Image: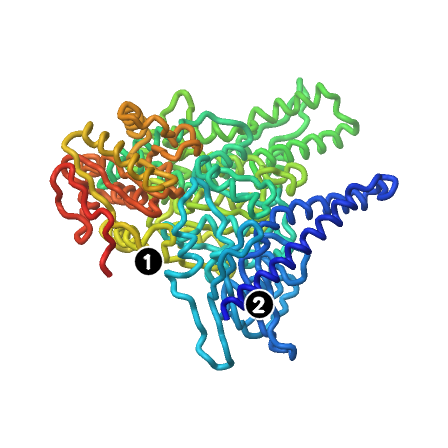
Amino acid sequence: MEDGIRKEEETKLEQTIGRIDQIVDDRKQWCQKGKEETGTGETLRETRRIYEECIRNLEEARPTPYFGRVDFEPATSPAGAETYYIGKYHIEIDYVYSFWAPVAALYYDPTSNGYKVPKSGDAIDGTVRLTRHLQIENTSLVEYRDVYRLATPGAKAMHIHAEESPLAHALAKRRTGQLRDIVETIQPQQYQQIVAGFRGVIIVQGVAGSGKSEVGIHRLAYLLSPHGETKLTPEEVIFFGPSKVFLRYISSMLPELEIPKIKQRTIFDWLRSTLSHSVKTEPLDRLLEKDLRGSIGKLPEGTQVARLKGSLAMARILDKYAKSMRTRFIGSATDIVVGHRKLMAKATVKKIARKSTETHLNEARKRVLQQVESEIRKKLDRLLEPQLQAEIEKKFSEFWPEVDFANAYFDLLSNRDSLATASKNTLTENELEIVVRLSQNREKKFKREDLPALCYLDHAINDRLNLGDRRQKPSSFSHAVVDEAQDVSPLEFTVLKLHSRNGAFTILGDLGQRLLPHWGISSWREVKNLFPEQNIRYWEAPYSYRSTYEITKYARRILTKIAPRAPRPRPYQRHGERPVFVRSKTFQDMVDAIARDIRTLSDQGMQTVAVLCKTALEASELRKKLARAGISNSVLLDKRGDYDSKVVISSIFTSKGLEYDAVILANARERNYPSTEMNGRLLYIAVTRAAHKLHVHWFGPLAKVLAVPGFFKEPNEGHRQEKGKKLRR
C-alpha cells in the first residue's frame, strides 16, 4: 500500500516537473523572439513582462512545486473526489494552487467542509477525504505523511498526532537568524486570520512565539495576491515593526512569499516622516535605558508625563488648544489699514473668519485671508497689486500669524496658563505643575514621547492629508500591519488612523510582553474604542510554537507570578531540554562560564545563540569581556543589527520579536533584576526568545522571579542543573 502511494506521488511529481519545464521553455522561446516577430506595442510589452515574471516564479517553484495534497469531494459533483496540490507559488497547472488560493483552505482546515471564493462570495461545499503533507527537495519526493484521512462515509477521521505533525518537524529545525515562512505549517486559526476580509480591523492577541509576525507577513502576501478581496498595490500597504533590527529580521521572508517591495517602518521613524518639518528629538535609547534602570513600584514624575503625552487625553488637550488659538486670533482682529486707508473694518474681518468651516488652523488662516483679499478687491473694483497684497497679508498676520506646530507645542507645555485652559477637567493642579516643570527646555529638543503629540497637533494646524493626490502621499495607506502593538500608544494609533484611507488594520501584539510603564496599552479595549465596534474582529492565539514544552511551561510560571491577568502561553507538544541554571562566584567567573557555554552550544549544532542582557550598555560591556575570553565572532545587535555571526549579544528590549536556537540569559542576579513587574516582564521576554535551549547565568542571589519551584533549586557555585532532562508531565 505504502509503495503504491509513493509511486503514485512520484509519478504525479514527475508529471508536474515536466509540465513546468514545458511552460518555461514555451515562455522563453516567445520572449526570445525578435521584435519584428512579436512587435513593440504596449500590449506585447506587458505580455513579455508577465511571461518573464512567470518564468521566474516557475524556476523558483520547480525544486518544490508543492508541499501538500487535498482530496475534496464537492457536494454537487457526481464524479467523486477531486485532487488539488498546494504550494508556495502560483503555477499555471490546473491541479496546483498557491497557499493563498481559496481551495488552500481545505488543506489548512480539513474540517471546514468547503471554501469560499472571496471576490464572488460563492461557497463551495463538500467533504475533505484526505490531506497529505509531501516533503519534496530538489524535485525528489523525500517523504509523505497523511495528516488527515476520512476513509469511508461516517467513519471517524484520522488526525496525525501533534508530535508527528509537519509543524512539529518544522519547529524542531534550527533557526537561521531570519524569519521563515510558515506556508507548510499554517494552523487553521492562523489561516482564518491570514485570509480575513480586507476591510475593518483584526486584532490578534498572541502569546510569545505564537506566530503573530508570520501571520502579519502572510496576510500581506494574501492581500497583495490575485485572490485578495481587493486589488491592492504594494504602495498602498505598510508594515510597522518595533525596531529596525526586527524589520531586517523579517525582510528575507518578503521575496519568498512573492511580496513586492513594500514600506516597512518603525512607528517612530514613520511619525517623524509625516511632520510638516523635522524636529530635534532625543535618541530613543536614552529613554529606554533610563526606564530599564528604574522601577515601576512608584511611578516617577517623568513616567507620568510620558504616559499623558501618549494618551487620548492629550489629543483632547491639543484639540482645545488649537481651537483656543483660533478664537484668540479672531478676537484680536483689527481693521485692515494700509497707509492711511481703511480697506476693511475689523467687524467684517471677524465675520468672515467666523464663517470659515475649515478645521485646520493654518488652512483656515489661508482661506480667511483669501476671502478678505477677495472682498477688498471687489471694493476697489480692481486687481490687487503685489505690493498692496503684501501689505494686506502683513497687517493680517499681526493678529493671525501662521502657526508653527513645534513652537505651539512647546509654548503650550511650558506655559501654565495656556495648559490650564486647554486641560480644564483633564489635569489636576499637581499634574499641571509637573508637566510645566518638566517641559522647560530652552533648546526645544523634544523627547520620544513628544512625537505622537507633535504629529497630532501638526494635523490640527496643517492639513497633512490633502496636499495634492491623497493616494500618492507616502504617509497614507490602505492597509497597515502593526506588529508588537502592545507598545504602541493610543495617541500613536490615533495618528495612524488619521493616515488610513479606509480604517483597515491588522494589529498584532501580546499584553504579556508590554514592558515600559509609560508607553503602549494595558488593554485591547484602548484600541477597540478607536474604531467602530462592528468593524473589529478579535482573535486570541494562546499556543507558543517557538519554544519547547519545557521552556514554555517555565515562561508561563514566570508570567503568572508577575502579571496574573496577562494572557498566558500554552505549550505545544514539542519536548526538549529543561532550562539550565549556572551560578558563578564572581562576575568574571560568570563571563568565563558564558564563554564555555557558547562554545558548547555551537558544538551541539545551535545555529543561533543569543546572549541577552538587561541594557544596551551592559551588552556592550559584556561583549568586550567575552572577546577577552575567546569569543571574538559575536555581533552586538544593539548597534549593528545584522546577522553576520551565529552569536549575538543584545539588550532584551532589542531582541523583542526575534528568536534563537539557544538563549543565554546573562547576569540574572537579584541586584540586577529586583522584584518589580517591569523586571519580571523583561525576564519573561528574554526566556521566550529561546526555541530549543535556555541557559541562565548569574552570581550571587538569583532574581527571585526566575527561581520557579519545580524548575530551580539553589545550586552550589558552578553547578549546572537539570541539563538534558525533560519536564515530567
Instruction: Give the spatial CA distance, label 2 vs label 1.
Output: 29 Å
Residue appearing at x 44%, y 55% in the figure? 204
Q: Amino acid at mark 1?
A: Arg
Residue 645 picture quarter: top left
Whether residue 317 appears in this view of the structure is no
Q: Which residue is mark 2?
A: 115
- Taking the spot 56% from the left edge, 48% from the top edge, the residue there is 257
Q: Between residue 345 and residue 499, name the one nearer to us.
A: 499
Q: Is residue 523 above or below residue 625?
A: below
Indicate the amino acid at tag 2.
Tyr
Relative to 431, is 471 on the left or the right? right
Q: Quadrant of residue 476?
A: top right
The quadrant of the rendering that contains the C terminus is bottom left
Label 1 crowd (10 A; few <14 / some 14-19 / many >=20): some
Q: Residue at x 46, y 44 (%)?
A: 179
Whether residue 507 is visible, yes or no, is: yes
Question: Picture coordinates of residue 45 (x, y %)?
Answer: 79, 42
- Give residue 308's position: percent from left, percent from top: 36, 40
Helix, strand or loop at disc 2?
strand
Residue 541 place in picture, x, y as percent: 40, 57
- Disc 1 on helix, strand or loop? strand
